[in-house]
Image: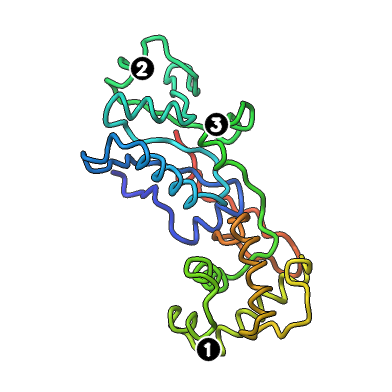
Amino acid sequence: MRADSPVLSDREVREANSGEGLNELVWETIPQARFAERSEICHLMGRAYIEIHRGYRLKEMITSQAENLQRLQWAIDAGGLCWDAKAARYVKSINKGTAEFARYPHIVGITRELELGRAGSWVGTLFDYQPPRFYFSASEQRLLIRCMSNGTGTNAALARELKVSLPTVKNMWLSIYERVSEIAPELIAGNAKIGADNKRGKEKRRHLLAYLQDHPEELRPVLRRSNGQRPREAVPPQNRQEIR
């Protein structure tokens, strides 16, 4: 309402993800009525949500207002805590009960510090974060993400999908492999020509993509290192990153 959007620009996301971390507001996801009671749909939605958000340095997660009591209870069962406005902190339960809590404007959420101090929850996996090792460029990340989404693919196919030239794709692979070989040579060990679409090159690519599948932080927006140094700690404006 003050024309100060809480939605971050791409640059702000990159800076926050390289510094103190991001706050995330989770909007309600409401399937069509005929699917609402099917547990496998809810499980699929949950898995997709985690897959999309893994690898970010999250600081706090907050749900929007629950549509009904059932949705509120689901958020709590997933690991959310209730915000106690009087105490100005998250609590496990509230004296007036969940039904009464849901009747009024409410907040359910969790912070990184609280999650790390308790037994694991479903949502807690999103706070498991480690900094990237390779700091790929944005164009290199797009190439790797595309390659992971459609199988390994050929360089020619990747060039068409990314709308760049074949030499550009080969140069990006060259840059990727050189960076990986400096930091983790065991991932692409071998003497194959690194830009080639040969059997050995595909095997090296497969090993790298398998690693990235388990390390999504390598494909998230982050400030790049320079001269072998870690990126500077960039802290966005407080009114953009703090929930008050």
**Label 3 Cα neighbours within 10 Å, binned few <14 / some 14-19 / many ≥20:** few
Secondary element under disc 2, as helix, strand or loop, is helix
Outermost residue, front side: 199
Earlier-in-chain disc, 2 versus 1: 2
User: x%, y% of residue 39?
Assistant: 36, 36
Q: How many marks?
A: 3
Front label number (2 vs 1): 1
Front position in the image: 199 or 17: 199
| Quarter that holds the N terminus | top left
Earlier-in-chain disc, 1 versus 3: 3
Does residue 85 appear left or right of residue 152 in this picture? Answer: left
Mark 2 and mark 1: Cα distance apart in space: 58 Å
Residue under the point 52% across and 70% down = 151
Mark 2 and mark 3: Cα distance apart in space: 19 Å
Front position in the image: 205 or 177: 205
User: x%, y% of residue 229?
Assistant: 75, 63
User: x%, y% of residue 163?
Assistant: 43, 83
Q: Which residue is mark 3?
A: 121
Does residue 36 appear left or right of residue 78 in this picture? Answer: left
Q: State yes or no: discs 2 and 3 in contact (Cβ < 8 Å).
A: no
Residue under the point 66% across and 57% down = 132
Q: Which residue is mark 2?
A: 98
Q: As shown in the figure, which amino acid type bears the numbered disc 2?
A: Thr
Q: Is residue 109 above or below residue 104?
A: below
Q: As shown in the figure, which amino acid type bears the numbered disc 1?
A: Leu
Earlier-in-chain disc, 2 versus 3: 2
Front label number (2 vs 3): 3
Q: Which residue is mark 1?
A: 166
Q: As shown in the figure, which amino acid type bears the numbered disc 3?
A: Ser
